[in-house]
Image: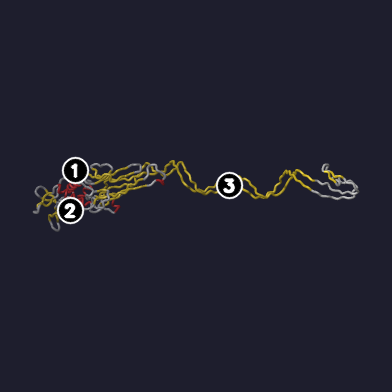
Amino acid sequence: MATTLIKLNGTGGDIKEMTTAEEAYIAYQVSTYLASASWVNTDVGTIINSTDTNQQPIGVFTNTFFNQGVGTHPGTSISSGSTAYTLKQQAGTRAETGLTYPISWSSTGNVGINQMTSAELDSVCDRILAYIMTNQWAGIMAIATTTPTNYTLFRSSVFSDTRADGTNTVYNLYKKTTLPTAPTTVRPVRLNGTAGDMREMTDSEIQLTFGQRVINRMVSTNDRTGRYFLGTSIPTSNGYTGTWVSLGTYTDTKLTTAETDYSANYSADYQINRTANTVKYFASNVTKNRATDYQRNRTANFQRSRAEPMYFGGYTHLPRPDIWYGTTYSPYSGRWTPASGTGYYAAINYFLGDYIADYIGNFVGDYLGDYVHDYAGDYVTDYLGNYVGDYVGNYVGTTVSATSTTVSTYTLYVRTA
């Protein structure tokens, strides 16, 4: 395959093969083309974060954050969130119009001067693209929060790093537009007409031919020179090959948490086992046999009537002093009137009336009945149950703090070789 470009040598119409170093002038013209291209969202090769299915993913970045603000506690009240974005590069084939194919020298096949084929032009464009990316000339992309030197804004708010304290760091996509110092002018040669004449390509022909093809080459496959990649490590760890350089970083930050003292109202139900001594008064009816001595004064009235006749006969002696003889009783004197005669009919003194007396003495016996008594003492038991209440006090626990930390750092890489 003939991939060596031909240049004019001197003023006499001689031609000569170009060196790769002399191809810098072509790279300069291509860089000018890339820097001035419109690169709208649908243009092949453009980079943007969108859901367009025609775009090839070149990396995923994640913005992590707490859903609650500074001071939120306890840990059970804190939750995290995240937003993932996919950075893409528009795939497809850019329409190529007005191409002018250069010529090359071939030592095999059709030996001599030949117009390059499309495949041979691809090989040359790969070298041009690598030169631009290695030297980071105009036309390359970078990510940053502020405009880097020699860059202009290309896509605003490509992604953001947000935190629960209200911080929002916006990252933009920038394109380098400042051209380097132009190298020595060395233009390739093309055929001029059908008679085999040759002439140098103009700068516009160089830009249009090599510029359009370079864009198509950088997006033809994922793993090739000019391809961009966003990740936390060099793409070789993800199956990519070649040499990659950094074109800016995106940092995902997040607030930290700390064990902090704070006051809080805490309401909760909890179960507890509790053993305690309790002084308790206990009243009950007790059936009890009790033997005791006690003294009791008792005053009682009782009445008793008794009539009992008694017979005596032949008595010559005086009767008992408490017995009266006679046949007639006088209620006025309370006596019996003796009767005359040899014999006596006697009757006992008859007492009819009330007897009132006091009884004083000791009674010893057993008491059987209900005994009611109050018991005061220590009551020991285990308590197992639920306690519901509010606790107000100091608590040490996980709290969202005002300091931040880096979660991940994503780098925008471009393959240079």
Helix, strand or loop at mark 2:
helix
Q: Quadrant of the N terminus?
A: bottom left
Q: Residue at x 86, y 50 (%)?
A: 311
| Comes first in the chain, label 2 or label 1 | 2
The quarter of the displayed image where residue 174 is located = top left
Which residue corresponds to mark 1? 181
**Residue 64 makes an appearance in the image:** yes
Helix, strand or loop at mark 3:
strand
Along the viewing direction, whichever of 302 and 190 lies nearer the viewer: 302
**Three-letter amino acid code of the residue under disc 3:** Tyr
| Residue 13 image offset from top left, x and y in percent | 9, 49
Query: CB atoms at circles 2 and 3 under 8 Å apart?
Result: no
**Mark 3 to mark 1 CA distance (whole Å):** 100 Å
**Residue 17 makes an appearance in the image:** no
Numbered label attached to residue 121: 2
**Mark 2 to mark 3 CA distance (whole Å):** 103 Å
**Three-letter amino acid code of the residue under disc 2:** Leu
**Mark 2 to mark 1 CA distance (whole Å):** 26 Å
Farthest residue in the bottom direction?
A: 109
| Residue 405 image offset from top left, x and y in percent | 35, 44
Left or right of residue 376, residue 235 in this image: left
Which residue corresponds to mark 3? 379
Left or right of residue 319, residue 123 in this image: left
The quarter of the displayed image where residue 321 is located = top right
Q: Which-is-in-front pick, marks 3 and 1?
A: 3
* Colour scheme of the picture: secondary structure
| Comes first in the chain, label 2 or label 3 | 2
Along the viewing direction, whichever of 382 and 201 lies nearer the viewer: 382
Helix, strand or loop at mark 1:
loop
Q: Which-is-in-front pick, marks 2 and 1?
A: 2
**Three-letter amino acid code of the residue under disc 1:** Thr
